[in-house]
Structure formats: C-alpha cells, structure tokens
C-alpha cells in the first residue's frame, strides 16, 4: 500500500510514477506476480545463500542506477527488509550498501549516494489493519521461540493491508539529502561510519516527518499509565482504540498487551528521543 499510495500522489500531481521494490515472499501467487510486473515492481529475492545474495544485490543495484540515470524514473525501496513488527523501523545500512554497489569507478560511495537525490518518505497510518496478524510472530521473537509462517500468511497479511481499515493516512516527503550526504562523506572517515551516519540521517528525517495520529498518543498513554498526551485525542477516539485493543489482544498476557501498545506508541517514543537529543 505504501508504494501504491505514493504513486497515486505522483500521478495526480503530473509526475512519473516510481518503480518499486517488492519482496519475492509477497508475489508467490501467479496473479500477484503479474500485477507486480504491470505496476513496474522489481523483485528483491530474500533468504538466499551468501554468494547468491551478493550477485542478486549487484543486479538490483545496477537496475536502480539505470532507472534513475537512464530512464529518469524514481525508485521506491523500503529502508530495511520488510517492516518490523514492533513499529520501530530503522534504516538497515545493508540496503544502503547494496544501492552504493553501482558507484562508478573512481567515485566514492558517498559521492555516488549524494548524486541519487535520496528523498525519505514517511508513511503514517492511523490504524494498522495487520496489527493483530503481527502478534504471533512478534511474541515468538520476544520469547525466543521458533516461528514458522503459515503457507498463506504473507498473502493474508498483504490482502489485509490493502483492504483493511486504516482510517486516516499521511504521506510526507522529506528534503533531498544530497548536501547532507556530501557532508557525511567529508566529515566521516571509513565506510562503516559513513553508512551508519547516512542511516541515522534517513531515520531522523522519516521520524521527524511522521504524522502522529491520536492512536499513537493513546497507545503511549496506555503503555505508560499516564495522561501525558490527553489533549491529543478525544474520549470517542480513546474508547474506539481500547475496544479494538481488547478484542485483538489477550488481556491476560502482559507481554502481548505491552507489545501491541508499543507497536502504536513507538513513533511517539522515537520523536521524543530525537527532541531530547536535539
């Protein structure tokens, strides 16, 4: 849905729609694979052996460069492999390193990244239609238990994400980061430090532009047992959220309750941390 809504905005503003990365786990069914091709998606293969992963990364990196520099078409790619279950999406520097693989000979990785016109995009949904579906895997991870996905689990999650209730949605495009990336290349020494700094820059931009809906504040207050953000939501909004929370989560399981609330509250926590750091 993220890339579909972004493309809708681009189309309505007279811009060329983006080509978009999609995990191969989401297009196992033939009709989804066909649909992804019709909408200019390119496939990111997951769970490959190390050697095959490297070769696949090189191909994707070259494709991204061709799309940007030869076809003049933007590329949308998630900042990590899939969304986290706990609402805390951090940029994975491995994704950035993969993109930088196509840096021309003689050009540094940061100089190359500074020429790509990177624009962080913040997608904020008031409600996550897949929140309850995420709980089994999230809880298994927190309890250090093995988790095996069902045969159609990814498809059900995908379908629920498309047709499920979200209420309000906000899309924010950050600034082009070329100048900031160039400064990282000048000030930071060593590839790891540079990619860490770039990941942190992207995270800060995404989190700062993220729209905090009432659900985020309600979850934060419930999680911490406070009314710190009481003015951010109405009684009706709080009641609706609690009814959904009670329905979707075993109220006798403290870890499940905490995990569900944190899933919604995490964006508030992230913004507060950045404000404190500043």
Image (tube, helix red, strand yellow):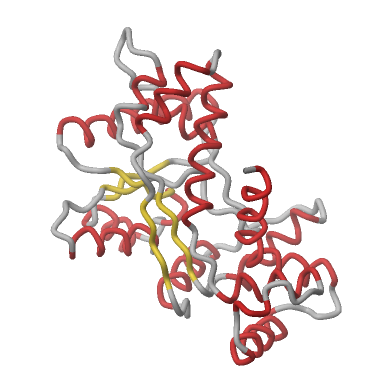
Residue closer to the observer: 100 or 172: 172
Q: Position of residue 152 (x, y in %)?
A: 52, 65
The location of residue 160, given as percent across then percent down, is 48, 73
In the rendered image, which quarter contains the N terminus?
Answer: bottom left
Q: Dividing the picture into quarters, in which one does residue 277 lie?
A: top right
x then y, percent, for residue 183 = 44, 23
Q: Is residue 45 left or right of residue 88?
A: left
Residue at point 53%, 52% (across, down): 207
Looking at the rendered image, the quarter that the C terminus falls into is: top right
Residue 137 vs residue 218, the one in the foreground? 218
Is 228 on the left-hand or right-hand side of 24? right
The answer to which quarter of the image holds residue 180 is top left
Q: Please, is residue 32 above or below residue 91 in the view?
A: below
Q: At x 22% / y 36%, what residue is drawn?
A: 67
Residue 106 x, y percent position in the rendering: 32, 7
Q: Nearer the viewer, residue 144 or 275?
A: 275
Tell me what residue is drawn at x 84 percent, y 73 percent: 253
Q: Identify which residue is drawn at 44% across, 60% down.
A: 123
Q: Quadrant of residue 104?
A: top left
Left or right? Give the position of 44 relative to 12. Answer: right
Vertical placement of 244 versus 43: above or below? below
């Amino acid at each position: 849905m993220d890339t579909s809504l972004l493309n809708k905005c681009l189309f309505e503003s007279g811009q060329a729609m983006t080509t978009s990365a999609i995990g191969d786990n989401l297009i196992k069914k033939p009709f989804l694979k066909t649909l992804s091709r019709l909408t200019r998606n390119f496939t990111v293969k997951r769970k490959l052996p190390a050697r095959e992963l490297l070769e696949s990364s090189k191909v994707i990196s070259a494709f991204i460069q061709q799309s940007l520099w030869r076809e003049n078409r933007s590329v949308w790619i998630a900042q990590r492999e899939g969304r986290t279950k706990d609402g805390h999406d951090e940029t994975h520097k491995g994704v950035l390193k993969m993109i930088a693989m196509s840096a021309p000979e003689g050009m540094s990785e940061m100089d190359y990244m500074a020429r790509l016109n990177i624009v962080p995009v913040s997608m904020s949904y008031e409600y996550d239609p897949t929140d309850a579906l995420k709980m089994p895997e999230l809880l298994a991870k927190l309890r250090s238990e093995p988790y095996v996905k069902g045969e159609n689990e990814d498809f059900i999650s995908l379908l629920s994400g498309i047709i499920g209730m979200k209420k309000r949605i906000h899309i924010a495009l950050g600034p082009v980061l070329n100048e900031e990336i160039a400064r990282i290349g000048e000030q930071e020494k060593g590839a790891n430090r540079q990619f860490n700094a770039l990941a942190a820059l992207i995270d800060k931009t995404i989190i700062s532009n993220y729209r905090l809906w009432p659900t985020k504040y309600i979850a934060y207050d419930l999680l911490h047992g406070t009314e710190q953000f009481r003015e951010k939501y109405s009684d009706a909004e709080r009641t609706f959220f609690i009814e959904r929370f009670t329905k979707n989560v075993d109220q006798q399981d403290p870890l499940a309750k905490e995990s569900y609330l944190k899933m919604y509250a995490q964006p508030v926590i992230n913004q507060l941390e950045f404000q404190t750091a500043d």
